[in-house]
Amino acid sequence: MSNWTNIRDSILDALEVENVTTQLKEEMTNNLLTNGIPAVKAVADKFTSQLQQQAKNERGWNKLRDQVVLPLIISGTIWAVQFSLRRCTNTQQNND
């Protein structure tokens, strides 16, 4: 099974629960950190690499967009989500 299948199944399982427990929240967060983020990073790295290759043939705004702006937004968003998820797991562990 691919990582996407694992992620999808864990999300579907989480949505079918009647009572969201602390353990379930921790499992979901950890699953996103261990499976979701690496899968998204792999796709983003490939996309960013292609953008930067195309930037060599661009000029002006399109060159700046493909070489700097979009890669920065993509990596910054992934970093922010990963940082937030890590903070959630640290906060939960510290409150127990």
Image: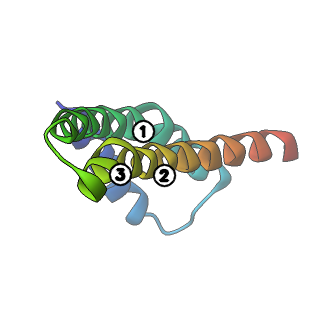
Position of residue 65 relative to residue 42, above or below, is below
Please give the residue where the numbered disc 2 appears in the rendered image.
Answer: 77
Amino acid carrying label 3: it is Leu
Of callouts 2 and 1, which one flags the residue occurring earlier in the amino acid sequence?
A: 1
Q: Nearer the viewer, residue 4 or 41?
A: 41
Amino acid marked by disc 1: Ile
According to the picture, the residue beneath numbered tag 1 turns out to be 37
Question: Are the residues flagged by discs 1 and 3 in contact, CB closer than 8 Å?
Answer: no
Residue 54 image-quadrant placement: top left
Up the image or down, 40 lies above or below 64; here it is: above
- Element class at badge 2: helix
Q: In this view, which residue lies farthest toward the right? A: 95
Q: Which of 77 and 10 lies nearest the eye of the viewer? A: 77
Label 2 with label 3: CB-CB less than 8 Å: no
Kindly identify the residue that appears in the image at 42 percent across and 57 percent down.
Answer: 14
Q: Crowdedness of circle 1 by 10 Å Cα count: few (<14), some, many (20+)?
A: some
Instruction: Identify the residue at horizontal 40%, vertical 51% (top origin).
Output: 69
Q: How far apart are marks 2 and 1 (CA)?
A: 11 Å
Circle 3 is placed at which residue position?
70
